[in-house]
Protein backbone atom coordinates (compact mmCIF):
# COMPACT_ATOMS: atom_id res chain seq x y z
CA UNK A 1 0.00 0.00 0.00
CA UNK A 2 2.87 2.40 0.71
CA UNK A 3 3.94 3.16 -2.87
CA UNK A 4 0.33 3.05 -4.11
CA UNK A 5 -0.73 5.69 -1.57
CA UNK A 6 2.12 7.99 -2.61
CA UNK A 7 1.24 7.60 -6.32
CA UNK A 8 -2.46 8.26 -5.74
CA UNK A 9 -1.71 11.27 -3.52
CA UNK A 10 0.56 12.75 -6.18
CA UNK A 11 -1.97 12.03 -8.93
CA UNK A 12 -4.45 14.07 -6.90
CA UNK A 13 -1.81 16.79 -6.53
CA UNK A 14 -2.03 16.67 -2.75
CA UNK A 15 0.71 17.34 -0.26
CA UNK A 16 0.91 15.26 2.90
CA UNK A 17 -0.52 18.28 4.75
CA UNK A 18 -3.49 18.48 2.37
CA UNK A 19 -4.20 14.75 2.64
CA UNK A 20 -3.96 14.99 6.43
CA UNK A 21 -6.50 17.81 6.41
CA UNK A 22 -8.90 15.80 4.22
CA UNK A 23 -8.67 12.66 6.34
CA UNK A 24 -8.18 13.95 9.87
CA UNK A 25 -4.98 11.88 10.12
CA UNK A 26 -1.62 13.36 11.04
CA UNK A 27 1.03 14.18 8.49
CA UNK A 28 3.59 12.07 10.37
CA UNK A 29 1.26 9.04 10.35
CA UNK A 30 0.62 9.40 6.59
CA UNK A 31 4.36 9.69 6.01
CA UNK A 32 4.89 6.43 7.90
CA UNK A 33 2.21 4.70 5.81
CA UNK A 34 3.82 5.94 2.59
CA UNK A 35 7.22 4.69 3.74
CA UNK A 36 5.80 1.29 4.71
CA UNK A 37 6.46 1.82 8.42
CA UNK A 38 2.80 1.64 9.39
CA UNK A 39 -0.19 -0.31 8.03
CA UNK A 40 -3.57 1.45 8.24
CA UNK A 41 -6.72 -0.18 9.54
CA UNK A 42 -9.63 -0.77 7.18
CA UNK A 43 -11.47 2.29 8.52
CA UNK A 44 -8.36 4.43 7.98
CA UNK A 45 -7.94 2.98 4.48
CA UNK A 46 -11.55 3.89 3.74
CA UNK A 47 -10.88 7.49 4.85
CA UNK A 48 -7.84 7.59 2.56
CA UNK A 49 -9.78 6.15 -0.38
CA UNK A 50 -12.56 8.69 0.09
CA UNK A 51 -10.05 11.57 0.26
CA UNK A 52 -8.34 10.31 -2.90
CA UNK A 53 -11.63 9.62 -4.75
CA UNK A 54 -10.78 5.96 -5.39
CA UNK A 55 -12.20 2.58 -4.47
CA UNK A 56 -10.54 1.28 -1.29
CA UNK A 57 -9.33 -1.77 -3.25
CA UNK A 58 -6.99 0.42 -5.29
CA UNK A 59 -5.00 1.19 -2.15
CA UNK A 60 -4.19 -2.49 -1.65
CA UNK A 61 -3.93 -3.75 -5.23
CA UNK A 62 -0.52 -4.95 -6.40
CA UNK A 63 -1.54 -4.58 -10.03
CA UNK A 64 -0.21 -1.59 -11.95
CA UNK A 65 -3.25 0.06 -13.42
CA UNK A 66 -3.23 1.29 -17.02
CA UNK A 67 -3.67 4.94 -16.09
CA UNK A 68 -0.60 4.88 -13.86
CA UNK A 69 1.73 3.78 -16.67
CA UNK A 70 1.00 4.33 -20.35
CA UNK A 71 3.27 3.01 -23.07
CA UNK A 72 2.89 4.39 -26.59
CA UNK A 73 4.87 2.59 -29.30
CA UNK A 74 6.24 4.58 -32.23
CA UNK A 75 3.61 3.15 -34.57
CA UNK A 76 0.82 3.92 -32.09
CA UNK A 77 1.15 7.71 -32.03
CA UNK A 78 -2.04 9.59 -32.88
CA UNK A 79 -1.91 11.93 -35.88
CA UNK A 80 -3.01 15.31 -34.54
CA UNK A 81 -2.30 17.41 -37.62
CA UNK A 82 -1.07 15.82 -40.81
CA UNK A 83 1.46 17.84 -42.72
CA UNK A 84 2.88 17.26 -46.15
CA UNK A 85 5.60 19.19 -47.88
CA UNK A 86 5.70 22.58 -46.23
CA UNK A 87 3.10 21.96 -43.51
CA UNK A 88 3.90 21.07 -39.92
CA UNK A 89 2.85 17.57 -38.85
CA UNK A 90 2.10 16.52 -35.27
CA UNK A 91 1.67 13.12 -33.63
CA UNK A 92 0.14 12.96 -30.17
CA UNK A 93 1.65 10.81 -27.46
CA UNK A 94 -0.65 9.36 -24.76
CA UNK A 95 -3.60 11.37 -26.02
CA UNK A 96 -6.05 8.98 -24.35
CA UNK A 97 -4.69 9.60 -20.87
CA UNK A 98 -7.00 11.87 -18.89
CA UNK A 99 -5.90 14.15 -16.11
CA UNK A 100 -2.36 14.59 -17.38
CA UNK A 101 -0.48 17.81 -16.69
CA UNK A 102 1.75 17.50 -19.75
CA UNK A 103 0.90 17.43 -23.45
CA UNK A 104 3.68 15.48 -25.22
CA UNK A 105 3.82 15.15 -28.98
CA UNK A 106 6.20 14.59 -31.87
CA UNK A 107 6.49 17.43 -34.34
CA UNK A 108 7.86 17.39 -37.88
CA UNK A 109 8.62 21.06 -38.69
CA UNK A 110 8.32 22.18 -42.32
CA UNK A 111 11.34 23.32 -44.33
CA UNK A 112 9.95 26.87 -44.31
CA UNK A 113 7.98 28.71 -41.67
CA UNK A 114 4.32 27.68 -42.16
CA UNK A 115 3.22 31.26 -42.20
CA UNK A 116 4.73 34.54 -41.15
CA UNK A 117 2.96 34.58 -37.79
CA UNK A 118 4.47 33.44 -34.52
CA UNK A 119 2.45 31.18 -32.20
CA UNK A 120 2.12 31.60 -28.45
CA UNK A 121 0.04 29.96 -25.74
CA UNK A 122 -0.09 29.79 -21.95
CA UNK A 123 2.32 27.61 -20.01
CA UNK A 124 5.80 26.26 -20.57
CA UNK A 125 7.29 24.30 -23.44
CA UNK A 126 10.15 21.84 -23.76
CA UNK A 127 11.56 21.31 -27.24
CA UNK A 128 14.02 18.42 -27.90
CA UNK A 129 15.48 17.74 -31.36
CA UNK A 130 15.44 13.98 -31.82
CA UNK A 131 16.67 14.02 -35.41
CA UNK A 132 17.85 16.64 -37.88
CA UNK A 133 18.43 20.36 -37.58
CA UNK A 134 15.91 23.01 -36.58
CA UNK A 135 15.63 26.75 -36.28
CA UNK A 136 13.44 27.88 -33.41
CA UNK A 137 12.60 31.52 -33.97
CA UNK A 138 11.51 34.02 -31.35
CA UNK A 139 10.76 37.70 -32.09
CA UNK A 140 14.19 38.81 -30.86
CA UNK A 141 16.39 35.85 -31.84
CA UNK A 142 16.64 32.58 -33.74
CA UNK A 143 18.18 29.54 -32.10
CA UNK A 144 19.87 26.87 -34.26
CA UNK A 145 19.45 23.38 -32.84
CA UNK A 146 20.91 20.03 -33.88
CA UNK A 147 20.20 16.45 -32.91
CA UNK A 148 20.17 16.13 -29.13
CA UNK A 149 19.79 19.86 -28.46
CA UNK A 150 16.89 21.18 -26.41
CA UNK A 151 15.19 24.40 -25.35
CA UNK A 152 12.88 25.10 -22.41
CA UNK A 153 10.90 28.34 -22.54
CA UNK A 154 7.79 30.18 -21.44
CA UNK A 155 5.28 29.44 -24.19
CA UNK A 156 3.82 32.95 -23.95
CA UNK A 157 6.92 34.05 -25.87
CA UNK A 158 5.90 33.98 -29.55
CA UNK A 159 7.73 31.21 -31.43
CA UNK A 160 7.86 29.20 -34.64
CA UNK A 161 10.13 26.50 -36.02
CA UNK A 162 11.36 24.99 -39.24
CA UNK A 163 13.60 22.16 -40.41
CA UNK A 164 16.93 23.28 -41.84
CA UNK A 165 19.02 20.58 -43.37
CA UNK A 166 18.78 17.66 -45.74
CA UNK A 167 16.25 15.67 -43.75
CA UNK A 168 13.02 16.79 -42.14
CA UNK A 169 13.61 17.17 -38.42
CA UNK A 170 11.84 15.17 -35.73
CA UNK A 171 11.20 17.09 -32.50
CA UNK A 172 9.75 15.99 -29.16
CA UNK A 173 7.66 18.83 -27.75
CA UNK A 174 6.14 18.78 -24.27
CA UNK A 175 3.75 21.52 -23.16
CA UNK A 176 2.69 22.14 -19.58
CA UNK A 177 -0.12 24.47 -18.61
CA UNK A 178 -1.99 24.03 -15.32
CA UNK A 179 -4.53 26.67 -16.24
CA UNK A 180 -5.51 25.13 -19.58
CA UNK A 181 -7.02 21.88 -18.38
CA UNK A 182 -10.13 20.71 -20.21
CA UNK A 183 -13.33 19.58 -18.54
CA UNK A 184 -11.98 16.04 -18.07
CA UNK A 185 -8.74 17.34 -16.55
CA UNK A 186 -6.54 16.70 -19.58
CA UNK A 187 -4.35 19.36 -21.14
CA UNK A 188 -6.02 21.55 -23.74
CA UNK A 189 -5.15 20.88 -27.40
CA UNK A 190 -2.45 22.74 -29.28
CA UNK A 191 -3.17 26.29 -30.33
Image: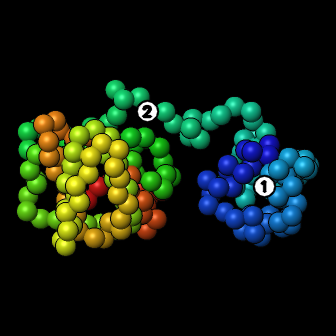
Q: Does label 2 or label 1 sit earlier along the sequence?
A: 1
Quadrant (top left/top right/bottom left/bottom right) for the C terminus:
bottom left
Q: What element carries label 1?
A: helix
Q: In this view, does 161 lie to the left or right of 188?
A: left
User: Answer yes or no: do the residues labelled 2 and 1 have beta carbons within 8 Å?
Assistant: no
Q: Which mark is residue 48?
A: 1
Q: In which quarter of the image is residue 21?
A: bottom right
Q: Position of residue 73 (x, y in %)?
A: 41, 28
Q: Position of residue 188 (x, y in %)?
A: 36, 57
Q: Position of residue 29 (x, y in %)?
A: 88, 60
Dot 2: within a 10 Å radius of its alpha carbon, few (fewer than 14), some, or many (20 or more) residues?
A: few
Disc 2 target residue: 72
Q: Which mark is residue 74?
A: none
Question: Is any part of residue 182 visible from this angle?
Answer: no
Residue drawn at the location 19% of the way across and 63% of the way down:
142
Q: Relative to 80, say whether 175 is above or below.
A: below
Q: Relative to 89, say whether 162 is above or below.
A: below
Whole-angstrom CA distance, mark 2 to mark 1, is 31 Å
Q: Relative to 120, say whether 97 is above or below.
A: above
Compare residues 62 and 145 and report the one nearer the observer.
Answer: 145
Question: Is any part of residue 152 visible from this angle?
Answer: yes
Q: Where is residue 132 in the image (x, y as percent from the top left)?
A: 23, 40
Q: In this view, does 152 lie to the left or right of 45?
A: left
Residue drawn at the location 74% of the way across and 33% of the way down:
62
- Give the residue furthest to the top: 75
Compare residues 49 and 13 and report the one nearer the observer.
Answer: 13
Compare residues 147 and 69 and report the one nearer the observer.
Answer: 147
Residue drawn at the location 43% of the way across and 40% of the way down:
94
Which circle, 2 or 1, is nearer the viewer?
2
Q: Is mark 2 on a helix, strand or loop?
A: loop
Dot 1: within a 10 Å radius of its alpha carbon, few (fewer than 14), some, or many (20 or more) residues?
A: many
Amino acid sequence: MSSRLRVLRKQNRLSLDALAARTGLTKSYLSKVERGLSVPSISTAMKLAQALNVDVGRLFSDEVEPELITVVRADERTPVAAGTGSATAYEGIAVGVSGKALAPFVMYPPPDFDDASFKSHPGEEFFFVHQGEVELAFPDRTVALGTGDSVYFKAEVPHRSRSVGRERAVVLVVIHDDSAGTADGSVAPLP
